[in-house]
Amino acid sequence: MISIQKKLFFIDLIDVFLAEEYNPKLSKKRLIIHHYSRVPGDNLFGEITYQLSLEKDEAELLEGMSKMNRYMLRRANKEPYEVVVKHNPTDGDLIEFQNFYNKFVQTKNTHKVNRYRLNRLKRLRDKGVVVFTKLQNTNAVALCYRIYIIDSDVVLNVYACSATWIKEQPDLKQQIRFANRYLLWQNMKLFKSRGFKIYDYGGITDINEINKFKEDFGFIGVEVYHGFDTESIIGKILVKLHWRKNIYLFS
């Protein structure tokens, strides 16, 4: 379980991630937000997320992918890619990611990484649970990013983005085409080598193309739980003012 805390309107706002038991410590000065809890709770709602077992060997992982993905990964090996991994990203690294991601979402129906979400990432980073990964070419042009939070045996992919908005550089078109898949596969192998058992790619979206992308990599649906717990009047007001998914989702 991962927990971070900040003060908001005279109450303690506590984010809890990947809990393995439901035992909220309530008070009139707390608002607890549960993300990807592995167990149900009184005030939590279930949602399907996509997960993959990293206990399979590499051959099994490849076999579980679509034929097209296996081809594209073989083809990606010919591209001038470099993978950058940082287990303690600096504020500058996270701002670099934020700027890239916010260009990416201009063409997508999703939320920007605003100051609230960036500060939450920084607090998670300060707990030592954020992994920053970037795919760039040999000219140091960033093509793709993935941001994770890690628990004892689970790695949760909280952000993924690629340079799909770049149109004016035809020489990058082929590199961008394979970038997202290549970085995903390299990260899967990285976390597998470090003993993580489960790769959680996040929940089902309203965009069928994204869901199919995950399924074509062999991810399957598993139920997890989200929600709020509070005895605070201010906390209850905050919950009513925000559609429940807007406050916990990363993207």
Image (cartoon, rainbow, N blue to C red):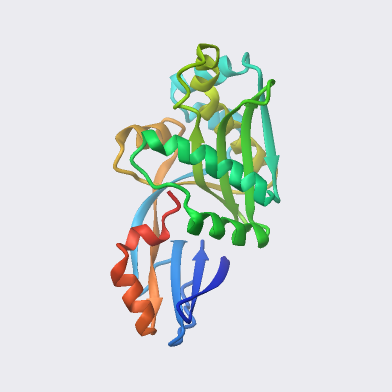
Residue pictured at 38% horizontal, 71% vertical: 228
Residue 52 in view (yes/no): yes
Along the line of sight, which residue is nearer the eye, 192 or 172?
Answer: 172
Residue 182: where, in percent of width, then height? 57, 27
Residue 82 placement, left or right of 225? right
For the N terminus, the quadrant is bottom right
Residue 191 versus residue 128 in the image, above or below = above
Residue 151 in view (yes/no): no
Residue pictured at 56% horizontal, 59% vertical: 119
Residue pictured at 50% horizontal, 40% vertical: 101
Residue 213: where, in percent of width, then height? 41, 32
Q: How many marks?
A: 0
Along the line of sight, which residue is nearer the eye, 86 or 117?
Answer: 117
Most extreme residue toward the bottom, as rendered?
A: 28
Residue 172: where, in percent of width, then height? 54, 16
Query: Which of the 4 quarters of the picture holds residue 144?
Result: top right
Residue 53 versus residue 122 in the image, above or below = above
Residue 10: where, in percent of width, then height? 48, 82
Residue pictured at 55% horizontal, 21% vertical: 73
Residue 161 placement, left or right of 234? right
